[in-house]
């Protein structure tokens, strides 16, 4: 096969359960990919600042990473930002009003992801703030979410992991005409502008590098990966994915995320001498 770009989700896919990856192992693979002029893309629900920090060790050693961040709201190469899309104030207000009126959301955590920072209510406990800081940069607690002076990329709700699929489907039915709801990692449901997902974001990079669909390899494990797993023929679902994902995507990586499954599959499929 001719592959010119590899895009992978992070949580539950590329990253191990301790939020890390084998840096030395990956550095060797990335160097081999760059020799073949194959782009590597971190395609995640995480914000771009978090992703850049995550890959800083390999970037400092000469590695080049491109980014699809915030589930497709932000696209950047290793050198420049290419694309960004934001929610309007009216859309954010509509989502917040829905949350306030929904009995199942009485104690729900709302996270607003912006260009300049991440915002949560000042009613959130210190423990909750620490949890948010594990995945989001520059977290601020504010009195009124709608008073934030920042461009907002997306709104995130946090529910128990086993409820994510149900809530994402319900929100998609409610807001689907103008917004997109998708389940992400660790119990989060992201509300994004209509048409924003990892597949449409990868198209921006495809246009930039002049790469065809069948020249892309993608990896994922969750519903926020579904569009790109369905779009690209060289797709791999992680063996650790939930059963409902395996009903939709049957081709799997050769090992789970805890065993560097993405790296091992890349080596095998591209016959890399690592």
Image (cartoon, grey):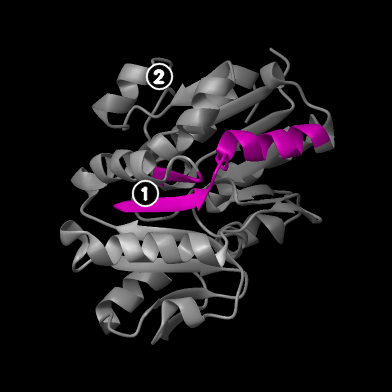
Q: Position of residue 39 (x, y in %)?
A: 73, 37
From the top left corner, tell me how far across and down residue 180 is, in percent.
47, 44
Q: Which mark is residue 185?
A: 1
Check residue 185 for magenta coloring: yes
Q: Residue at x 58, y 15 (%)?
A: 233
Task: Relative to 228, say whether 16 is above or below.
Answer: below
At horizontal 59% and vertical 80% (from top left) the residue drawn is: 149
Comparing 47 with 251, the one in front is: 47
Can you say which quadrant of the picture contains the N terminus? top right
Q: Is residue 198 left or right of residue 98?
A: right
Residue corresponding to mark 2: 249
Q: CA distance from mark 2 to mark 1?
A: 18 Å
In depth, the one of 245 and 79 nearer the eye is 245
- Residue 87, percent from left and from top: 56, 59
**Start-end of magenta stretch:** 178-207
Q: Is residue 246 visible?
A: yes
How crowded pointer 2 is (Cα within 10 Å; few <14, some 14-19, many 20+) is rated as some
Most extreme residue toward the top, as rendered?
1
Q: Nearer the viewer, residue 194 or 131?
A: 194
- Residue at 62 percent across and 31 percent down: it is 274
> Which numbered disc, 2 or 1, marks the residue that appears first in the sequence?
1
Give me the residue at 71% from left, 61% from top: 60
């Amino acid at each position: 096969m001719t592959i010119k770009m590899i895009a992978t989700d992070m949580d539950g896919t590329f990253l191990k359960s301790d939020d890390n990856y084998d840096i030395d192992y990956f550095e060797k693979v990335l160097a081999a990919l760059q020799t073949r002029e194959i782009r590597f893309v971190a395609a995640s629900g995480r914000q771009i600042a978090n992703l850049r920090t995550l890959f800083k060790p390999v970037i400092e050693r000469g590695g080049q990473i491109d980014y699809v961040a915030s589930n497709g709201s932000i696209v950047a190469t290793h050198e420049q930002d290419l694309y960004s899309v934001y929610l309007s104030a009216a859309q954010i207000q509509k989502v917040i009003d829905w949350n306030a009126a929904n009995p199942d959301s009485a104690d729900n955590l709302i996270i607003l992801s912006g260009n300049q920072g991440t915002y949560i209510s000042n009613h959130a406990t210190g423990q909750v703030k620490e949890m948010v800081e594990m995945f989001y940069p520059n977290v601020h607690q504010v009195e009124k979410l709608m008073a934030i002076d920042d461009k907002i990329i997306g709104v995130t709700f946090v529910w128990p992991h086993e409820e994510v699929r149900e809530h994402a489907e319900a929100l998609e039915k409610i807001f689907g005409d103008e917004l997109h709801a998708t389940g992400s990692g660790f119990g989060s449901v992201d509300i994004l502008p209509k048409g924003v997902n990892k597949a449409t974001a990868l198209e921006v990079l495809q246009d930039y590098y002049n790469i065809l669909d069948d020249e892309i390899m993608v990896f994922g494990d969750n519903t926020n990966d579904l569009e790109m797993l369905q779009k690209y023929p060289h797709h791999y679902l992680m063996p650790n994915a939930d059963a409902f994902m395996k009903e939709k995507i049957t081709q799997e990586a050769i090992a789970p995320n805890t065993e560097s499954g993405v790296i091992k599959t890349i080596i095998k499929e591209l016959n890399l001498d690592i």
